[in-house]
Amino acid sequence: MQAAIMRAREQILLLLGEQRLGTRLPGERVLSERFGVSRMTLRAAMDILIEEGLIFRSARSGTFVVKPITSSGLGLKSFSNTMTDRGFSVTSRVISLKEIKADKTLAETLRIRTSSIVFKATRVRFGNETPISIEELYLSKDLVPDLTKSALTGSLYSFLKDKHGIVIQTAENRISAHIPSEAEMKLLQIDAGVPTLRMRVIDADQNGNIVMKAICHYRSDLYNLNLQLVSVQNLDGKILQASS
């Protein structure tokens, strides 16, 4: 029985290799007939894959291909590097790029004058052709006057470093849950009720200058953020704070 389960697991793995992230798999009846195994054997094999984190079962919607992208909150790494390190191909689709005048709040965030010209860009980031996140970016035109849609199709961190000598060294990150709008759900190809992981990021360069404000929405079904909490204690052993 166990041998049959493991053979079924291998067959399902081959099927997963052909699918995009988030793809809904055929039903158990279809798969059991396709692989020539009983539904009990198939379900046992799928249970193993669920435990391994390769598929996800929803009582209402079915079973989906899941290969979560896990990013550590302890290190500063671009989306492109996070994805390529895990073997994903990375692409971007630029939704819009326009110039706006900075209001008081944005000007204070970027440390520029009110009404200064700022590039506002929106793009969708893909891993293996599956939409993973939406990014809304704000950069001062005085800092990066040559920003184009073409530059935004690749790694923005690399563009800033190669073209302007700007190296992102630190980032202030605020994380919260977010219920996406209909437009966001369409761009991320998710159903109503599926939350996103919202990150508000303020990037600073090697000289401590603010470079960019970014508001990112990550698919919660495909992107995980790991945080390691470390207790800081005084000499008496009393916990003073926890940080990540």
Image (spheres, grey):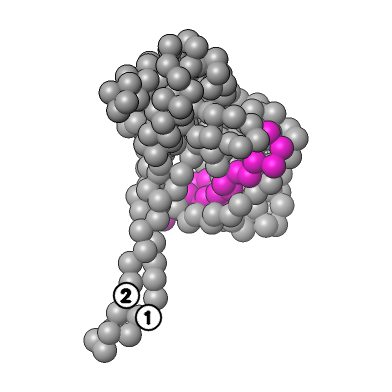
Horizontal and vertical percent for residue 208?
41, 55
Residue 16 appears in the rendering: no
The magenta stretch spans residue 101: no
Residue at horizontal 57 percent and vertical 46 percent from the top: 197
Horizontal and vertical percent for residue 80?
41, 32
Q: Nearer the viewer, residue 150 or 132?
A: 132
Residue 232: quarter of image: bottom left
Label 1: element kind: strand
Question: Where does label 1 land, which residue?
Answer: 240
Q: Which label sits on residue 232?
A: 2
Cα gap from disc 1 to disc 2, whole angstroms: 6 Å
Name the residue type under label 1.
Leu
Residue at horizontal 58 percent and vertical 54 percent from the top: 176
Q: Which residues are magenta?
A: 191-212
The magenta stretch spans residue 203: yes
Horizontal and vertical percent for residue 233?
30, 79
